[in-house]
């Protein structure tokens, strides 16, 4: 169609775009108002196409919209019709009508249920589990088919037919007895596992409770021995209460708990004899950020005394602790870490120190040749070492680790015959001063 020469030339249309900047489609152009100039500017073919786009579809849906409802409704009708035919065939006892209706109903049902079942399968069963599920089901079907085609089932049936029922019954009774025995064994195993789990939970709960008790003790002792100015007090009543709390906690915890309490008290300088002001009872500072010790006349905030007698401290960590003048008679210190531990004037009669680490452990002051065990009547001389040593008579030092020559000399000299037989390296050439 040629344009009319009498009409003015068509002006180029403006670039009409949507608010988001995307060029409009033909249907969107058609929905806009068309002027006479626009109609004359476009061809008759484009006009017809635009009018077709503007006209609604017969079913009221937009072009390209899938009519799922319209397609699903005939399936339901066909399913109902096929079900009715199947029941009619069953009523009339007609094989072909009933079979045809059931096959059609089954096919339509599978077609309707396939999409939701597939969505449900994908949503609730992961891909790996789906592969295992399908592999197991179809593998079992294939195995049954293989056994059927190879005649294994027939052979098994023939073998069972030749057997006597009495023998089979006896075999069943034997298998039943074996099953009951296995059930009893399984019940015993389950009970044992429950006992183990209950025991572990009890041990764990006891450990937590013990740690809470120790923490409460630490807090109570800290508040008791410190005044508002943060200095150690020396009032007898406060020390008596602190010693009472310590005796109670040491008698109620295990070896690990005892070691924690001892390390806390030792590092807090509550077990060391501190030099004090004779009038105020205040601990005297040493000028190096700590308190000055006085081994001869000092007063301990907490005196362990006999709290650790016969105590079990095996396998614990007692490094750098001050156990001087404590009573450890018959205590078990086997496999204990005693590195740099102060055991001067400590009573170790019949104590077990098997495989204990004695690296730097102090048993006495001064020289080993001049040192001697503590005495009840004679005060210690820390300059010469007399009466400053530990009482090691009857102590067991079997396989003690890192025992120095000075330690070996002192323990051999003052340990007696029983102790000398357990000293690593022997006591040859060292006099038995205890025997004299």
Image: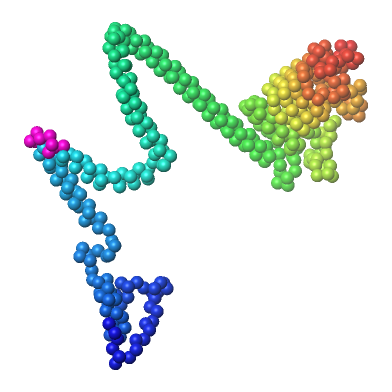
* Identity of the residue drawn at 83% across and 36% down: 293
Quarter of image, res 120 = top left
Instruction: Look at 72% across and 23% down and name the residue there.
Output: 335
Q: Which residues are magenta?
A: 91-99
* Percent x, y of residue 272: 78, 33
Give 305 or 87, whichever is nearer the viewer. 87
Q: Residue at x 15, y 43 (%)?
A: 82
Q: Is residue 383 above or below residue 109?
A: above
The quadrant the N terminus occupies is bottom left
Q: Nearer the viewer, residue 309 or 75?
A: 75
* Relative image position of residue 415 (x, y in whole percent): 82, 16
Hey, which quadrant is residue 277 in on the image?
A: top right
Q: Residue at x 43, y 39 (%)?
A: 128
Residue sitting at the far front? 2
Would residue 38 appear left or right of 362 to someone viewing this image? left
Whether residue 279 is visible to the viewer of this picture, yes or no, is: no
Q: Is residue 94 magenta?
A: yes
Is the stretch drawn in magenta largely helix, strand or loop?
helix
322 and 10: which is toward the camera: 10
How are the colours assigned in the image? rainbow
Q: Position of residue 20 (x, y in %)?
A: 41, 72
335 left or right of 163 in image: right
Is residue 120 magenta-colored? no
Instruction: Please state if 95 lies on the left or on the right of 337 as rendered.
Output: left
Q: How many marks?
A: 0
Residue 182 x/y as whole percent:
42, 16
Quarter of the picture holding the C terminus: top right
- State which quadrant residue 292 falls in: top right
């Amino acid at each position: 169609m040629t344009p009319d020469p009498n009409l003015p030339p068509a002006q180029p249309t403006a670039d009409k775009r949507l608010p988001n900047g995307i060029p409009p489609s033909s249907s969107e152009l058609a929905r806009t108002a068309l002027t006479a100039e626009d109609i004359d500017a476009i061809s008759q073919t484009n006009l017809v196409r635009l009018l077709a786009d503007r006209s609604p579809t017969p079913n009221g849906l937009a072009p390209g919209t899938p009519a799922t409802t319209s397609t699903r409704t005939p399936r339901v009708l066909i399913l109902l019709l096929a079900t009715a035919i199947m029941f009619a065939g069953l009523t009339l006892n007609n094989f072909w009508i009933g079979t045809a209706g059931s096959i059609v109903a089954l096919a339509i049902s599978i077609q309707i249920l396939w999409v939701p079942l597939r969505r449900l399968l994908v949503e609730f069963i992961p891909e790996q589990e789906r592969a295992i599920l399908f592999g197991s089901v179809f593998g079992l079907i294939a195995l049954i088919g293989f056994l059927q085609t190879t005649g294994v089932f027939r052979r098994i049936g023939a073998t069972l037919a030749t057997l006597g029922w009495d023998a089979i019954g006896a075999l069943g009774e034997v298998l039943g007895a074996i099953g009951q025995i296995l059930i009893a064994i399984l019940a015993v195993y389950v009970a044992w596992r429950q006992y183990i789990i209950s025991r572990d939970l009890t041990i764990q709960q006891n450990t937590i409770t013990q740690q809470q008790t120790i923490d409460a003790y630490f807090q109570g002792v800290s508040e008791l021995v410190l005044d508002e100015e943060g200095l150690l007090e020396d009032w007898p009543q406060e020390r008596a209460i602190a010693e009472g709390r310590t005796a109670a906690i040491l008698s109620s915890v295990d070896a690990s708990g005892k070691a924690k309490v001892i390390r806390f008290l030792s590092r807090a300088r509550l077990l060391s004899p501190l030099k004090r002001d004779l009038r105020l009872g205040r601990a005297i500072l040493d000028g190096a950020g700590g308190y000055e010790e006085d081994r001869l006349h000092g007063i301990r905030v907490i005196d362990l005394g006999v709290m650790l007698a016969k105590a079990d401290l095996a396998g614990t960590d007692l490094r750098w602790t001050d156990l001087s003048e404590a009573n450890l008679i018959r205590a078990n210190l086997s496999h204990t870490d005693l590195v740099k531990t102060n055991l001067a004037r400590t009573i170790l009669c019949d104590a077990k120190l098997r495989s204990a680490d004695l690296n730097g452990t102090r048993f006495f002051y001064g020289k080993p040749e001049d040192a001697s065990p503590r005495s009840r009547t004679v005060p210690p001389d820390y300059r010469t070492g007399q009466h400053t040593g530990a009482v090691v008579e009857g102590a067991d030092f079997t396989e003690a680790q890192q025992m120095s020559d000075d330690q070996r000399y002192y323990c051999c000299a003052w340990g007696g015959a029983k102790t000398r037989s357990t000293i690593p390296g022997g006591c040859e050439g060292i006099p038995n001063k205890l025997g004299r």
